[in-house]
Structure formats: C-alpha cells, structure tokens
Image: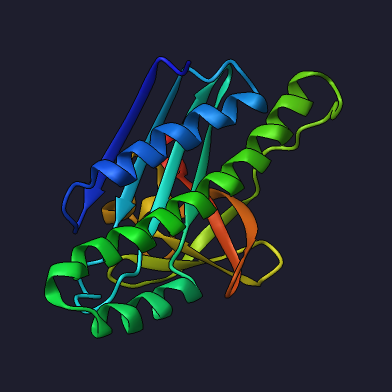
Amino acid sequence: MIPIIHTTFKGMEHSDAVESLVRKEATKLQRFFDGITSCSVVIDKPKHHVEGSQYHVRIVLDVPGEQIVVSKDPSEHATLARTETQRVHKSQELDTVHKYAQVAVHDAFRRAGRRLEDYARRLAGAVKTHEPAPTAEVARLGEDFGFLRAPDGHEVYFHRNSVLDDGFEELRVGSAVRFVEEAGEQGAQASTVTPLAHHGV
C-alpha cells in the first residue's frame, strides 16, 4: 500500500468517484514498482474552458532517488465531453463532467505506469546509463502554457502544471530549464519542466 495518496481538484467540485479511482489506479502502479512512497495527483479543469470538460492531470510519484512526474493534457475526449454535456439535463451535467475526469485520470495513470516501469528497469540495472535531462530555454509563454526551444531548435509544448516547484509564474522568455520530452497527442510536449534557477544551477 502506498503510504500517502493525495488528490487535489482545481476548477471543479470534489468528486468521491474520481478520488476513489485515483486511489485504485495508484495502488495498481505497485505492480511495476512497490517502493512508491507517495503519490500526488492534481486534476485541473482550466477556468477558460467554462463550457467544456477539458482536464489537465498531473501525477507526482516519489520513489527512491527521484520524482516521477507525468502530465496529461486535454485530448479528443474533451471535445466529446463538451458535446455530451450540452445534451444532458443540468442535473446530469456534474456526472458527465466527472465521467470525463475519470477518463483523463485513467490515461494519465497509464502513462505513469510506463514511466514507473522504465524507472524500475533502470533501478534493476537493465539500463546502465541515464543521461541528464536536456536543457532548453522558454521561447513563448501563454496564460497557463508555454513552449520551450530545445537545443536543436524544435519547440516543445508544456503546461503550467508540468513545471516543478510551482515555478510557472516565475518563468520568463529566455529562462533556462531542464525538461523531459515525450510524444503528446498534438506533438512534442514536456512532461516535466525544471527551472534551473530554482535549483541553484
């Protein structure tokens, strides 16, 4: 059993069903690695999507020697959610919203499982080398997202919830960061952004 499982809701009401799913999915992660010391999940419904059911899910797993951070941005299920929400009666709307929050949570934990499996392999020595995360600079910033310019010049999307130490507000164009890149549904995205200034680099 994971000692600490913490769920935070932003921009939406608390849902017992969603929190229960988080605990269930977090427990299932132990089949990849049973040394997780804590699991924190933030489920965020951006305030500028007032009519929709778009969600950003961020999972932080504390494991020996590092943190595993996974971010899941809104995808095509958000569009389906908006359509369905518009069709149902107001009394059913909350259930529909929570239904699609659960879809986003499930997708994020599936990604977390892959990351945790990679970590367990490294720990077991299956992967003997672990190169440090590459550096980049902030190329553009929006209200709750931005783009990094990688060393080879390509741009990588990131969401504010992917920035460690709650450092999004302190980022500026040109800020130096380290990042972990993965393939998102709309192209390259950063699952983790670490502002170098926060770490004395």
Quadrant of residue 89 within the rendered picture: bottom left
Residue 200 makes an appearance in the image = no
x then y, percent, for residue 114: 67, 42
Q: How has the structure been colored for display?
A: rainbow
Could you tell whether 96 is left or right of 39 in the image? left
* In the image, residue 150 above or below residue 65: below
Horizontal side of 60 relative to 42 (left or right) equals right
Relative depth, front residue between 177 and 34: 34
The structure residue drawn at horizontal position 44% and vertical position 57%, both measured from the top left corner, is 104
Q: Is residue 31 above or below residue 108?
A: above
**Residue 8, horizontal then vertical, whole percent:** 26, 41
Q: Is residue 150 above or below residue 7?
A: below
Q: How many marks?
A: 0
Of 118 and 148, nearer the camera is 118
- Work out whether residue 72 can be spotted: yes
Q: Position of residue 85 (x, y in %)?
A: 27, 77
Residue drawn at the location 25% of the way across and 75% of the way down? 49
* Residue found at the far left of this picture: 91
Taking the spot 34% from the left edge, 84% from the top edge, the residue there is: 83
Viewer-nearest residue: 17 or 105? 17
Of residues 169 and 54, which is closer to you in this image?
54
| Residue 64 percent across, percent down from the top left | 57, 16
Task: Name the residue rendered at 32%, 51% in the picture.
Answer: 43
Is 18 left or right of 39, judged from the image as shown? Answer: left
